[in-house]
Image (cartoon, rainbow, N blue to C red):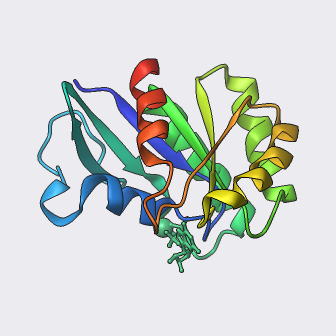
Amino acid sequence: MLPVVALVGRPNVGKSTLFNYLTRTRDALVADFPGLTRDRQYGRVRRGQKSYFVVDTGGIVETELGIEEQAMRQVNYALEEANLILLLVDARQGLSAGDEAIAERLRKTGKPVLLVVNKIDRADLAVVAGEFYALGLGEPYPISASHAIGIDALLDEVEARL
Ligand code: GDP
Ligand code: MG
């Protein structure tokens, strides 16, 4: 079984954008790979010698649940099976209570987490990432999923931890 990297975070932080970028989607879906649960969206990442799954837990939208509850449910899915969790936050919105709630839950589990600050569309915006140190999850990794900024550095760190 390949390692699994789960993307978690509030709605609209850019999880699916990052997922699509990493997996270049469509043929990346691996619904027939044994051992994977069907209700999450999986894609395979191949980079150099490394190969792993990335899972976008945000695909499961249960409309009867509130946003916070949904995000927490996604965190629980991720905790079940991920070897590494990427918590995405939105640099444009800044630190939010929802981010703090998710971060607290993740800190309690002891699973390895990387904090990813998305929507840093210009490199000079990376200073914004600093405020997310307050989440207590270590160094924030600034990226722009839509502009393909910071992804190589992030993946180097991901792969070092798998
Ligand atoms: P999800 O709900 O976490 O899966 O978020 P999505 O991937 O659906 O993205 C939510 C919105 O943020 C969409 O309009 C994306 O185009 C936008 N978005 C994602 N990444 C970036 C980014 O790096 N920069 C900017 N400016 N917008 C982004
Ligand atoms: Mg999504």
Q: Is residue 13 above or below residue 72?
A: below
**Ligand 1: image quarter:** bottom right
Look at the image and tell me whether residue 60 can be seen.
no
Image coordinates of residue 61 in percent, x first then y, are 51, 69
Judged from this view, the residue extending furthest toward the front is: 124
Judged from this view, the residue extending furthest toward the bottom is: 63
Q: Nearer the viewer, residue 112 or 144?
A: 144
Residue in view at x 63 percent, y 74 percent: 64
Q: Is residue 131 above or below residue 153?
A: below
Residue in view at x 49 percent, y 56 percent: 149
Image coordinates of residue 98 in percent, x first then y, are 79, 57
Image coordinates of residue 41 in percent, x first then y, are 33, 56
Residue in view at x 18 percent, y 55 percent: 28
Quadrant (top left/top right/bottom left/bottom right) for the C terminus: top left
Quadrant (top left/top right/bottom left/bottom right) for the N terminus: top left
Give the side of residue 41 with respect to residue 2, left or right: right
Give the side of residue 47 with respect to residue 97, left or right: left
Image coordinates of residue 69 in percent, x first then y, are 70, 59
Look at the image and tell me whether residue 73 can be seen.
yes
Q: Nearer the viewer, residue 119 or 45?
A: 119
Give the side of residue 76 with respect to residue 157, left or right: right
Q: Nearer the viewer, residue 128 or 106?
A: 128
How many marks can you see? 0
Quadrant in the rendering for residue 36? top left
Q: Is residue 105 above or below residue 65?
A: above
Residue in view at x 23 percent, y 44 percent: 44
